[in-house]
Every structure is written in structure tokens, then in C-alpha cells.
Image (cartoon, rainbow, N blue to C red):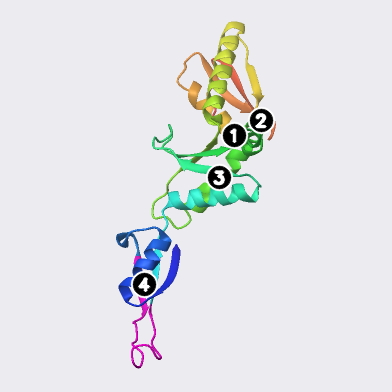
Amino acid sequence: MKKVVATGRTVEEAITSALVRLGVSRSQAEIRVISEPVKGLFGFIGGRDAEVEVCVMETPLDMAKEFLHGLLEKMGISADVTAENQLTEDGAVPLAITCAEDALPIVIGRHGSTLDSMQYLVNLVANRNAHSVVKFSVDAGGYRQRRRENLRRMADQAVERAVRLGRPVSLEAMPSADRKWIHTYLQGRDDITTLSEGQEPYRRVKVAPKRNHFVD
């Protein structure tokens, strides 16, 4: 919640001042009059301005963008955070980080690990007081789409080899989110099954012909 205390010669003047500082309309705000204006002796001696408190409830999107921007600042990265209009495949609101090219490796991390950590924190903070949960996806430099294309290519190649050779084929070690994406992507096939093997952080997907389907 954002809150501003403002004064003015009248209550309306004080309210207008607070709304301008918050950058919201009156319909978006909760207003509490702290004190009415008091006229002074002879019009000025001992007078007192009106004082109001104006609050505006932040939406999960507001909180997500504000938190993410602050997190990037603490990382020493100058960046803009914008929300895209179209939801992701799993119904998340996409938050795009725009920063200098040389900062992208830091923001993304190995296999998107930094992005995943920021995404987890953003969802935690933005939905802390929300009446209904809003899911957010955090991306930078179009990494998520490129990663999905790479995962799709790796999965297709693994299926082709497993079927052709008649034996299981293991993919490279990858984070849980990537493994789950591959499991989901391949789950409709009737010629192969998938399972995960190994211990974190070296856990990987194995594509095997004609076996039970496991999803971690």
C-alpha cells in the first residue's frame, strides 16, 4: 500500500495534492481526513491547513514490477521492467527486463537460473496480500523463447535417437523447470516415455522407448 499525507488550505486542495503525488485518480484511492482547516485570528494568526491521508492499494502487477526493479538496482543493474499484454502458455503475466547487452548474462544466469530465482521471489512478494494469485513470468532478452526452442530441438533429437537405436537416451543436466517442460512436451507420444535420473544439480531427462512415463 502506498500512503501520502498532504496539507492544503482546504480538504479538497489537500486531497488533490496527495493524488497528484501518488499519480492516481480519486476512484483508486482511500481518503482519510486527519484534520479540517482552521481559520486563524484576523484570517492568518493561528490558522491551520487541512491535513489528509490518501492511500492506494497496489495491484500484484505494481508490486511485481516495483520489487523486480528494486532487486535489479541492488544487483547494480540499470534496467526497465515492463509487462507484456499477452499471457504465457501457462497463464502467467510476462515481465520483460530490458538492460544493457553486457548485463544480460548476469540477469539470465546459467540456464536461466538467475531469472528463475527472480521469478520465484517476484511471485512470492507480489501475491503476499493478494485476494487471488497472479502468476508472473520473468524474462530478459527473449531468453525464455530461445531456451524453449533449444529444449524442443534437444527433445526431438533424443526421441529420434531412442526410437532408432532402441535404447534410452539421456539429455544434458538441466533445472527442474526445463525437465518438466520436456516431460510435458513429450507426454503425448506413444512410442517413448520419459523419466528423470540423477541428483541435483546433475539431474537429467532420459528418453526411453516403450516404458512407463514418469514426471518429476
In the image, the segment drawn in magenta is 30-50
Q: Nearer the viewer, mark 1 or mark 3?
A: 3
Alpha carbon distance from label 2 to label 3: 20 Å
Alpha carbon distance from label 1 to label 3: 13 Å
Majority secondary structure of magenta residues: loop
Q: Do the CB atoms of the residues marked 2 and 1 lie less than 8 Å apart?
A: yes
According to the picture, the residue beneath numbered tag 4 turns out to be 14
Q: Is residue 182 visible?
A: no
- Label 2: element kind: loop
- N-terminal of the pair, mark 1 or mark 3, is 3
According to the picture, the residue beneath numbered tag 1 turns out to be 176
Q: Nearer the viewer, residue 129 or 164?
A: 129
Q: Amino acid at mark 3?
A: Tyr
Residue appearing at x 66%, y 34% in the figure: 102
Alpha carbon distance from label 4 to label 3: 40 Å
Q: Which quadrant holds the C terminus?
A: top right
- Label 1: element kind: helix
According to the picture, the residue beneath numbered tag 3 turns out to be 120
Q: Residue furthest top?
A: 164
Q: Position of residue 66 (x, y in %)?
A: 51, 52
Alpha carbon distance from label 4 to label 1: 53 Å
- N-terminal of the pair, mark 4 or mark 3, is 4
According to the picture, the residue beneath numbered tag 2 turns out to be 203
Graded by Cα atoms within 10 Å as few (under 14), some (14 to 19) or many (20 or more), the crowding at tag 3 reads some
Q: Is residue 20 left or right of residue 151?
A: left
- N-terminal of the pair, mark 2 or mark 3, is 3
Q: Nearer the viewer, mark 4 or mark 2?
A: 4
- N-terminal of the pair, mark 2 or mark 1, is 1
Graded by Cα atoms within 10 Å as few (under 14), some (14 to 19) or many (20 or more), the crowding at tag 4 reads many
